[in-house]
Image (spheres, helix red, strand yellow):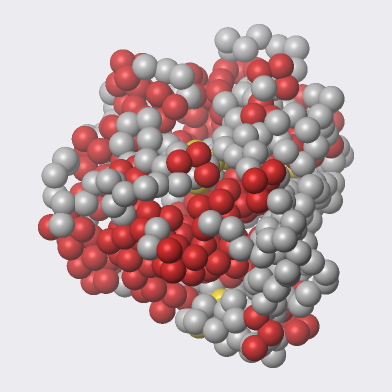
Amino acid sequence: MWKRTGIQRVFPQYCRKNRSDHTMNIPFKKAALLGGAILALGSCDDFLDVNQNPNDPTEVPSSFALPNAINRPAVVSGNTLNVLGNLWVGNWAQAGDYLFYLPEQQYNLTPLTYESVWTEMYAGSLPDLAYIERQARASGDKNTLAIARIMQAYDYQILVDAFGDVPFGESLQGTSNLTPNYEKAEVIYDNLITMLNEGLASIDVNATNPGTNDILFKGDMAKWRRFANTLKLRVYLRQAQARPTVAQQGIQAMATAGATFLGANENAAVNPGYLNTSGKQNPLYALFYNTAGAETSNRKATRANTLGLDYLKATNDTLRLKRIYSVVSGRNANSYRNYQGLYSGAPSSNPIYNSTRLSAPGASVVDAPTNNGFAKPVYLMLASESFFLQAEAAQRGWLTGASAQTQYENGIKESFRFLGFTDAQAQTYYAQTTAATTVADLTAPNGATFDPKAIAPNWTAAQDKIEAIITQKWIANNGFNGFEAWSEFRRTGFPKGNYISLNATQQQFPVRIPYPQNELSNNPNTPKGVTIFTPKIFWDVN
C-alpha cells in the first residue's frame, strides 16, 4: 500500500498534465478556514499526525473536511476515468496527428498509467471520509455522518468497477498494516449496500446540516437521501446479470420501503468554487485549456468517435449532437454533415483524420473560456441516469410505480433539458419509430450493423427494451460520465456498435484497469496475473 513520501496538506495546489494522469487536485474556498488542519497521507499511513502547534490544529469539525473528501472522487470520475471511459465506449477518439492517447488506443496500459485513480481514493478521499466519519460519530453530527457513509460507498464502487478485488476491511489502518488483504469484489458490493443503508438511516432533515461545506447538495439532506437511493439502485442493477436474485430482492425491498430517487434537474453536481486559476479550474476544463484560454494538446488530441456521431445522426438527434460535439472548425454548425469523427486507431497517415478536420467534445461537455467553462461543475451522476435506472428496474419487473416506458421517456426528456432543450423537442425525438436513412456509415469496424429500426428511440418500436434503455443512457452520459458508460457496456454489451480499436495490441475489449505499480511492488497480497483483459469484474458476465 501507499508509503509516506512527505506530509501533504489537504489542499495541495498542483495540476498534473502528463498523459498518464488525467487528474488534478483542487483547492477550495474553505481552505482558509481549515488552515491546513488535516493531513492527507497515504492510505497505509496514520491519517492524522499529532501536531501541537496551536496555529496548525490537527482536528477540525467534520463538516469542514467535506469539500476535499467530495472533490477528490469528482476529479477521478469527472476527468481521469471520464476520459478513459469515453475513449473505450465509442464517444471519443484520438486525432490522427497526435499520440497522446496511444496507450488507451492500443490497449497498452501499464501499472503506472492510471495509478492516480488509486491514489486519489486510498490516499485522498477515503482517509478524509474515515476521519469525517469518526468525528461525526463522536460529535453526534448525524447528517455529516450520513454524507460520509454515502460517499464511501460511491468511492468503493468506483474502485471495484475499475480494479475488481481491492483492500476494504483492512484498508486505511495506517502503519499498523502496510499490506492489507484484498477482498472479493462481490463482498465489497454487499458492504456498499450496508454503507448506503447506514447513511440513509442517519439522515435527519430537521438536524443541523453542513451547509455550504457540502459542495454537492449544499446541505439539502432530502437530495442526499434521493442520491443514496439512486446510487443503491445503480449498485443493485450492476449485479442484474451476475447475481439476479440479490438485485431483484434488493430493489423490491426498496420499492416496498417507498424509496425515492433523483428527479428532474437533480443532477449530482460538485463545485467547490472553480476559478480560472491554475489548480482551481474544473478538472476536465483544465485538461483542455490553460488559464489564458488557449487549447492544450490534450484538447486538440481529443476528437469525436464516429460511433457516437453516427448514433446521433442515425436517429435524427441533431439537437443533442450540436451540444455533445462541436462542429468542424470553420464550418456551418446547422448541417450535421459538418460534424465529423474517426474510429479509434484509424491510420494517422491519412490527413482526413487530422484534428482540424474533426469534431471535438462540445460546449455542453467542456464550455469555452469565454463562457467560463472553468467554473462549471463536475457531475457524479446525472438526473437522466436516475430515470434510466428506474426504467431498467421496472422493465425487469423489480420496481413498481411508473412504467418502464414512462421512466425511459423521462430519462430522454431529462437529457434534453440538461442540454438546454424542451420536453416537446424530446418528445418529437422519441416519437420516431425508424431511424434516419441518410447516414451512409452504419457499420462499425467490428462488422456490427446499426439496424435503423433496432436503434430507433421510440419505446414501442424498440426490439430490445434493455438495449434501448442502456443505449439512451450511453448517449446521455456522453462526455459527462464516460466511466459509467463503459461499466454499463461491460455489463450489458450495449451499445452494440462499440468496437475494438483498429490498432489494438489484442483483439479483445479491456475489462478493467491494472493495479498500480506501488501496490504490485509493496503489497504481496495484490492479486497476481491480472491484466486489463482478465479476469473480468464479477458483475461482467456479458
Q: Point out the image quarter for the N terminus.
A: bottom right
Q: Depth check: give the residue in front, 486 or 198.
A: 198
Rendered residue at 78%/56% (across/down): 20
Residue 446 in view, yes or no: no
Q: Depth check: give the residue in front, 349 or 198.
A: 198
Taking the image as shown, residue 16 lies to the left or right of residue 524, namely right
Q: Position of residue 417 (x, y in %)?
A: 40, 24
Q: Position of residue 361 (x, y in %)?
A: 65, 31
Taking the image as shown, residue 265 lies to the left or right of residue 8, namely left
Residue 61 in view, yes or no: yes
**In the image, is residue 427 above or below residue 87?**
above
- Count how many numbered circles sit on residues in the image: 0
In the current view of this chain or complex, which residue is farthest to the front?
54
Q: Looking at the rendering, which quadrant does residue 26 occupy? A: top right
Q: Point out the image quarter for the C terminus.
A: bottom left
Taking the image as shown, residue 413 lies to the left or right of residue 254, namely right
Q: Looking at the rendering, which quadrant does residue 433 occupy? A: top left
Q: Depth check: give the residue in front, 264 or 53.
A: 53
Q: Position of residue 40 (x, y in %)?
A: 69, 64
**In the image, is residue 306 above or below residue 234?**
above
Rendered residue at 78%/33% (across/down): 277
Rendered residue at 21%/43% (across/down): 404
Q: Position of residue 83 (x, y in %)?
A: 65, 46
Rendered residue at 70%/73% (across/down): 50
Taking the image as shown, residue 519 lies to the left or right of residue 237, namely right
**In the image, is residue 65 above or below residue 157?**
above
Q: Depth check: give the residue in front, 440 or 33.
A: 33
